[in-house]
Amino acid sequence: SHLDYFLKCSLGSISEEQGEKFHQDIKDMEKRFQ
């Protein structure tokens, strides 16, 4: 999906720690929209 593509691009340009938190935020958002 384009969300996966977006995540890869974004996480590639952030530090791992920030990326991990960002990824968790995305997971929470996905749960809300399900």
Image: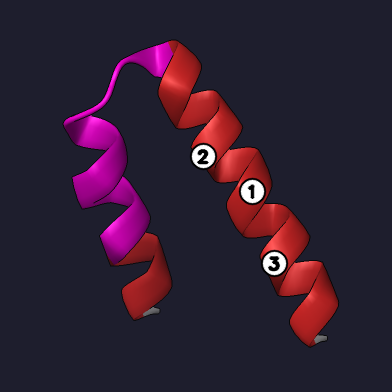
Residue with the mark numbered 3: 29
Instruction: From the viewer's perspective, tell me whether residue 26 is left or right of residue 33.
Output: left
Q: Main secondary structure of the magenta part?
A: helix
Residue 3 image offset from top left, x and y in percent: 40, 71
Q: Answer yes or no: do the residues labelled 3 and 1 have beta carbons within 8 Å? A: yes
Relative to 23, say whether 7 is above or below: below
Q: Position of residue 28 (x, y in %)?
A: 76, 57
Q: Are marks 1 and 2 in contact (CB under 8 Å)?
A: yes
Q: Quadrant of the N terminus?
A: bottom left
Residue 7, placed above or below residue 29? above
Name the amino acid type tagged 2.
Answer: Phe
Which span is picked out in magenta? 6-16
Residue to which mark 1 is pinned = 25
The C terminus lies in quadrant: bottom right
Distance CA(mark 2)–CA(mark 3): 11 Å
Q: Earlier in the sequence, mark 2 or mark 3?
A: 2
